[in-house]
Every structure is written in structure tokens, then in C-alpha cells.
């Protein structure tokens, strides 16, 4: 598998920023290029409400966004977490295999995501005719052409991520998620049309919105969007606060007296990223429903869909996540379903997110070498020890085992709960709770990373200490 | 602090795709500039073809 070249030696911070910015510009450029051969009207986004976290843009070259990468990652996490791969990620030969397998999976997933989008169910309707320089294409050929474009776009995303990971700051995936969510958030605030927060308030103040009916409901849930604003701000605050909640394990150096440190086990130890995997799992179930519904049709027990392509009852309705207050606030009269159906859907969503969040957090910690065993080894190798305990890997591991698994599960479940709660109350710009959680925590991580980079720029000696070069 | 020791632990911020230091010596190496160039070219070509069609 072709790979992006690694930089030789140290890349100056400014150069890193330049690469990151370059990729970001390219990303926005590509999201604005419409697919050749697509008919603009009549297209429905297969990703639907999941678009906010899967990045990309419907009908553009980046149609698939990071969807295939996330799906491939789920497979890798499950295989790795359950130790089915049989690869030791400390062994250089297995590392090569792991990376190759990872890329191969992404390529396969890109094809698997793009195929039904183009060929099944009319998610991307084709133009009647297309002629390029005298060559006339029929509809099947146009579809093939569109598939090629989407496929190349998907592969490009993979390599753009690799460029950022190796030459830039943070990761490409994180960058694309932040880009997508921020764009929606800003649009949600300032767009000069219905749905824009400031525009709607302008209208409310100047009496263009009818407040005669249920004033409170209009201000809170309707045009006023007060609830969404509060949720958005609260999520920001909670995530930034939770990042600083930690159990600190004291460390001291075995030989150098007075050299002390702490190993922090954060509340969100596994970071928020496992959450995207849970959501992607839900997304893939919904895609399956959409595709089956559009192509072969499914019995009512499995799912019935309305004109907008949203499931209204059956299995696919119950497993669909709650996206907005309109999906569940049965007392407002906007929900078409019975109350008990809504309650079942809420409980399934909460269970899925909490349990899924915890499980994927555990897998995440295992596969990214943040588990008790790996951290104990890292601490031992650095010559540190826990004061009052023998300097021995298995002893450190025992101490780590008291904290890491518990904190991981609690953190994962908490993040899952937070995501559902934010979705239920709504967010500005419909970025979804998960999208907001991801964006805030990735930005926070990015900030930490930039701070570390800057410190290394200012004190070249630090580089040796951090062991980067 | 902790960061000195767990160079592996920092992977968590690296994202969903993991890249290791070791690489297949037989693999084709792509320059990062090539990735950006291909991206720009893809966009420009598709846009131009849309105009002419």
C-alpha cells in the first residue's frame, strides 16, 4: 500500500501549521466541487443526520466523508480489542501489517459505501444525458463515472489524513470533523434565513414571528432556540471541565532524587473519539434500512418510511437515534408516533450509547496502548516508579488496574449519556450532541498539542526529553 | 510529567487511523505535495468538465 513519506528530522512548527492549513483549504475546496453527472435536485443524502459527524458534503467529491475510515476503524477496533488479529503492535513487522490491513479496509469500505449511493435507490440521481467532447454517456456510464469520482474522493480523504498526521498538527480526521461542525455551528448562528439564530431573534424582536400561540414553546424550542443555545454552551463547558477531572498517580524517579511527576488518568480517559464509532454503528444500521427500503422494500415490521425518507415505525424507527426535540417531545403534538413508541426509542438510544460508549472506550484504550499493561511498561521504561511500591512492571500494572478500567467505563458511559442528552434538547445548527462533543474535545486536544509543540520550538532540549526526535 | 514516558499514549489524539514509525520498505512513498496536487487537480478537472458538458 502506498504511504505518505515521513518527514526526515524535525518539522518546524510553522511548517506543520502550513501543511494543516493547506489540507484544510483543499478539504473545503473539494467539498464545493459538485459531482460531474449528478442531477442537482431530487438527491437525498444517505448520511442524513449523521452528516455532521461524518464530514464531507453531500453531492460533492467528498460525498463519503470520513464514513469509510470510521467504519474500517470499527472493524479494526473490534478485531484488535477482542485480540482476534494476533498482531503485536510493538513488533515492527506486525506494525507494517497492521497499517496495510487498515488501509485495505478503508479502500474496501469506500467502495462499499459509494456503490449503493450511486447504483441503488436513487440517492444521487443522474443527469439525463452527458456529453464530453463529442462522447455521449448513457445513464449507466454516468453512474460509473460518478462512482469513480466518489471513490477517488474517498481515497484522497485517507491520504489527506495521513499528510496531516505525519506532517501537520493533530489528525486529518479530527480536522475534518472540527471543520464540518464549526461550519454548521457558525451557519446556525449567522445565516440570514430561517433557522439562523440571530436572524430569527431579529424577526422575533421586530414582531415578524407570530408569538400568539404558545409563546414559551416558540421561544424555547421554536424560532427562539433558547434551549439549543443553552445546550450548546453547556456542552462546551462540561467537556472542558471534564477534561481537567482526573485521578493523578504520583510518580518519582528511581535514581534522580526529587524528580517527581504524576500520571493523570482523566475522567474522559479514552477521549470522545470512541463515541463516533458507536454513532457510526447506528448510522450503518440506518443506511442498511434506507438502502433496503429504496431497493427491495421491507415489511412494515422492519420499517416504514415517510416521504422524507425517515423511518416512522418498525425496527429501523426504534434503533434510529433521537436527533432533535421534535423527535421525542410528545406533549408538543409534533410527534407522529404514540408516546410508548417514543419512550421505547429513547430507551434504546440511551442504552445503545451508554453501553456502546463504555465498550468502545475499553477497546479504544486497549488498541491505542493506553491500558494498564502498556502504561505500566511505559512508566517502567522511563525509570519512574510509584512511591511506596516496588519498582516492578507488574506492581505498577496492579496499581493502574485499580483506576484505568473503572475510569474508562465511567467516562465512556458518561460521554454517551451526554451525547444523547444534547441531541434530545437540540443544538444550534443541528450539529448533534456527538458532533459538538467531538469538536470541543478535539479542539482541546489540538490546543494541548500546539502548546507542547511551541514549548519544543522554544526549548530544543525539550525535544530529547519528549523523545520525539 | 507523564508525556515524557508515554509516547505511545499520545496516539489517542492521533485519530482513528494509526500510523507507526516503521514502514514497509517496499511501499511506494508519496510526497505530501503530491497528495495536495492530486486533490487540486481532481477538483479543477471535475469542475472544468462540468462547465464544458
Image (cartoon, helix red, strand yellow):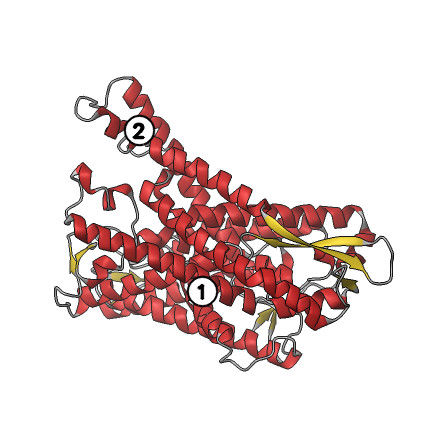
Q: Chain of mark 1?
A: A
Instruction: Please indicate, yes or no, whether residue A375 appears anywhere in the rendered image.
Output: yes
Mark 1: give few (<14), some (14-19) or many (20+) Cα within 10 Å.
Answer: some
Give the left or right position of residue A76, taking residue A121 as reference.
right
Residue lying furthest top: A206
Q: Between marks 2 and 1, how big is the CA–CA gap? A: 38 Å
Corner quadrant of residue A354? bottom left
Corner quadrant of residue A347? bottom left
* Rendered location of residue A14, percent (x, y): 69, 47
Q: Nearer the viewer, residue A178 or A58?
A: A178
* Rendered location of residue A331, percent (x, y): 18, 39
Q: Nearer the viewer, residue A464 or A24?
A: A464
Say which residue appears at 65% left-offset and 79% top-offset: A91
Q: Which mark is residue A224?
A: 2
The quarter of the rendered structure image containing the N terminus of chain A is bottom right
* Rendered location of residue A417, percent (x, y): 40, 51
Give the left or right position of residue A299, taking residue A441 as reference.
left
Give the left or right position of residue A287, taking residue A54 as reference.
left
The quarter of the rendered structure image containing the C terminus of chain A is bottom right
> Vertically, is A288 above or below A343?
below
Instruction: Please indicate, yes or no, whether residue B20 appears anywhere in the rendered image.
Output: no
Q: Earlier in the sequence, mark 2 or mark 1?
A: 2
Query: For the residues tagged 2 and 1, is the chain the same?
Result: yes
> SS at mark 1?
helix
> SS at mark 2?
loop
Q: Which residue is mark 1?
A: A359
Say which residue appears at 40% left-offset and 68% top-offset: A110
Say which residue appears at 40% left-offset and 62% top-offset: A356
* Rendered location of residue A316, percent (x, y): 22, 61
Say which residue appears at 41% left-offset and 48% top-offset: A418
Mark 2: give few (<14), some (14-19) or many (20+) Cα within 10 Å.
Answer: many
Amino acid at each position: 500500500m502506498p504511504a505518505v513519506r515521513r518527514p526526515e528530522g524535525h518539522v518546524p512548527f510553522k511548517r506543520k501549521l502550513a501543511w494543516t492549513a493547506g489540507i484544510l483549504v483543499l478539504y473545503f475546496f473539494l467539498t464545493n466541487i459538485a459531482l460531474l453527472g449528478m442531477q442537482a435536485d431530487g438527491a437525498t443524502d444517505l448520511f442524513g443526520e449523521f452528516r455532521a459527524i461524518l464530514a464531507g458534503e453531500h453531492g460533492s467529491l467528498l460525498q463519503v466523508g470520513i464514513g469509510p475510515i470510521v467504519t474500517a476503524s470499527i472493524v479494526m477496533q473490534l478485531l484488535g480489542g477482542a485480540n482476534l488479529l494476533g498482531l503485536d503492535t510493538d513488533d515492527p513487522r506486525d506494525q507494517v501489517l497492521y497499517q496495510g490491513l487498515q488501509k485495505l479496509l478503508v479502500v474496501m469500505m469506500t467502495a462499499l459505501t459509494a456503490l449503493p449511493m450511486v447504483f441503488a435507490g436513487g440517492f444521487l440521481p443522474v443527469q439525463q444525458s452527458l456529453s464530453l467532447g463529442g462522447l455521449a454517456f448513457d445513464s449507466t456510464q454516468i453512474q460509473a463515472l460518478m462512482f469513480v469520482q466518489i471513490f477517488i474522493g474517498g481515497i484522497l480523504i485517507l491520504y489527506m489524513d495521513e499528510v496531516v498526521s505525519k506532517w501537520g498538527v493533530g489528525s486529518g480526521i479530527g480536522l475534518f470533523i472540527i471543520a464540518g461542525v464549526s461550519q454548521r455551528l457558525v451557519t446556525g448562528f449567522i445565516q440570514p434565513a430561517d433557522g439562523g439564530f440571530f436572524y430569527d431573534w431579529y424577526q422575533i424582536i421586530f414582531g415578524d414571528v407570530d408569538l400568539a400561540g404558545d409563546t414559551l414553546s416558540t421561544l424555547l424550542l421554536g424560532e427562539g432556540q433558547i434551549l439549543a443555545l443553552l445546550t450548546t454552551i453547556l456542552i462546551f463547558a462540561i467537556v472542558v471541565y471534564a477534561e481537567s477531572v482526573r485521578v493523578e498517580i504520583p510518580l518519582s524517579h528511581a535514581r534522580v532524587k526529587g524528580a517527581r511527576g504524576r500520571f493523570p488518568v482523566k475522567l474522559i480517559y479514552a477521549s470522545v473519539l470512541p463515541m463516533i464509532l458507536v454513532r457510526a454503528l447506528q448510522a450503518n444500521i440506518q443506511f442498511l434500512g434506507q438502502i433496503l427500503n429504496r431497493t427491495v422494500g421491507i415489511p412494515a415490521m422492519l420499517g416504514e418510511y415517510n416521504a422524507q425518507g425517515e423511518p416512522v415505525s418498525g425496527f429501523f424507527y426504534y434503533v434510529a437515534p433521537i436527533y432533535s426535540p421534535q423527535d421525542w417531545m410528545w406533549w408538543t403534538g409534533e410527534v407522529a408516533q404514540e408516546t410508548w413508541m417514543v419512550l421505547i426509542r429513547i430507551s434504546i438510544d440511551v442504552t445503545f450509547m451508554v453501553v456502546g460508549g463504555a465498550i468502545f472506550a475499553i477497546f479504544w484504550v486497549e488498541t491505542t496502548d493506553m491500558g494498564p499493561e502498556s502504561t505500566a511498561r511505559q512508566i517502567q521504561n522511563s525509570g519512574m516508579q510509584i512511591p511506596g511500591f516496588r519498582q516492578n512492571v507488574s506492581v505498577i500494572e496492579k496499581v493502574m488496574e485499580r483506576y484505568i478500567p473503572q475510569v474508562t467505563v465511567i467516562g465512556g458511559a458518561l460521554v454517551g449519556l451526554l451525547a444523547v442528552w444534547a441531541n434530545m434538547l437540540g443544538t444550534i445548527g443541528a450539529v448533534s450532541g456527538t458532533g459538538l462533543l467531538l469538536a470541543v474535545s478535539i479542539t482541546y486536544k489540538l490546543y494541548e498539542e500546539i502548546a507542547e509543540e511551541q514549548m519544543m520550538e522554544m526549548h530544543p532540549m525539550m525535544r530529547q526529553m519528549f523523545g520525539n526526535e | 510529567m507523564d508525556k515524557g514516558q508515554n509516547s505511545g499514549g499520545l496516539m489517542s489524539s492521533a485519530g482513528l487511523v494509526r500510523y507507526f514509525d516503521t514502514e514497509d520498505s517496499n511501499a511506494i512513498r508519496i510526497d505530501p505535495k503530491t497528495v495536495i496536487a492530486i486533490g487540486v487537480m481532481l477538483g479543477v478537472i471535475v469542475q472544468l468538465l462540468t462547465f464544458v458538458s
